[in-house]
């Protein structure tokens, strides 16, 4: 009887087997840091993901984090509007936020349409409406007076930072894509003013961005150039 009791007691004793292997003791890698892109466009999110080449970041958009608020873009420049959006959504989300503002500047229009690029022909204007209005405004002008450029400004705001006066500081990166406005729409690629925008490397009457393949535009566009300048700044932030 005493032997059976001893045997039962032994079977309930803690195991004294080998300690867990180093493989079992490994700590699971932490989730990649999230970077909010201030857009609801999956196209723009995918484009920036490809252009920035961030290996340690999870890029998400406003819908991914459940933000329904919209910020009114009241700034007079692309830089001020990009900064406004970056600050607004960084505070709303608590996440580092990347925002952009971009558009077209035409020399003959004194830099217009500028910040009104998307609304040039009206609040509900289509791309075709905007293109038609711009072509009418430049009718009869020779190529040397049709100079234009796309501009993009990317702004990064990190919510736990404070500037010297208590505001949320932003880091900016800029890109420019120079060219001229053609005399008629050509090509179905791209969007916006691409069918009437002739890059500077093309001769007058040459191919528009609407006729370029997407990968050619992406290599030299204003957003691509701004992204190349922003990428190392984001890498230093740990993205």
Image (spheres, helix red, strand yellow):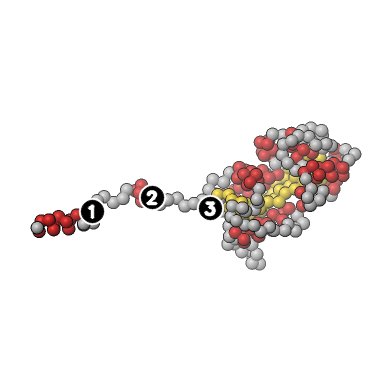
Distance, label 3 to label 1, CA atoms, is 41 Å
Q: Nearer the viewer, mark 1 or mark 2?
A: 1
Q: For residue 53, what is the image quadrant?
A: top right
Secondary structure under the numbered disc 2 in the rendered image: loop
Q: Which residue is mark 1?
A: 16
From this viewpoint, which residue is outermost toward the right? 140
Residue 12 located left or right of residue 93 = left
Position in image of residue 4 (x %, y %): 12, 56
Across and down, in percent, residue 103 comes to 75, 48
Q: Looking at the image, which residue is at 55% across and 53% down? A: 34
Residues 40 and 59: in front is 40
Q: Quadrant of residue 210?
A: top right
The residue that mark 2 highlights is 26
Question: What's the CA distance linking mark 3 and mark 2?
Answer: 20 Å
Q: At 81% across and 44% down in the image, what residue appears? A: 129
Sequence-wise, the earlier of marks 1 and 2 is 1
| Chain-order first, disc 3 or disc 2 | 2
* Residue 91, percent from left and from top: 62, 61
> Left of 232 or right of it: where is 137?
right
């Amino acid at each position: 009887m005493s032997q059976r009791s001893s045997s039962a007691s032994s079977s309930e004793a803690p195991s004294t087997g080998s300690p867990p292997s180093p493989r079992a003791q490994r700590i699971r890698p932490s989730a990649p840091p999230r970077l909010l892109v201030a857009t609801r466009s999956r196209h723009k999110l995918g484009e920036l993901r490809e252009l920035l080449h961030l290996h340690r970041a999870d890029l998400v958009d406003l819908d991914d984090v459940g933000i329904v608020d919209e910020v009114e873009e009241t700034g007079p420049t692309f830089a001020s509007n990009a900064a406004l959006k970056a600050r607004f959504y960084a505070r709303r989300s608590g996440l580092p936020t990347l925002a952009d503002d971009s558009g077209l500047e035409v020399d003959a229009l004194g830099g217009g349409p500028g910040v009104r690029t998307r609304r040039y022909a009206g609040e509900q204007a289509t791309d075709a409406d905007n293109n038609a209005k711009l072509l009418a405004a430049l009718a009869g002008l020779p190529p040397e007076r049709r100079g234009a450029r796309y501009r993009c400004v990317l702004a990064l705001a990190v919510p736990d930072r404070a500037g010297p006066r208590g505001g949320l500081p932003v880091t900016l990166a800029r890109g420019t894509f120079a060219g001229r406005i053609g005399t008629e729409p050509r090509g179905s690629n791209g969007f916006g003013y691409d069918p009437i925008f002739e890059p500077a490397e093309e001769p007058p009457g040459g191919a528009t961005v609407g006729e370029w393949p997407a990968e050619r535009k992406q290599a030299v566009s204003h957003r691509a150039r701004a992204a190349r300048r922003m990428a190392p700044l984001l890498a230093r932030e740990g993205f």
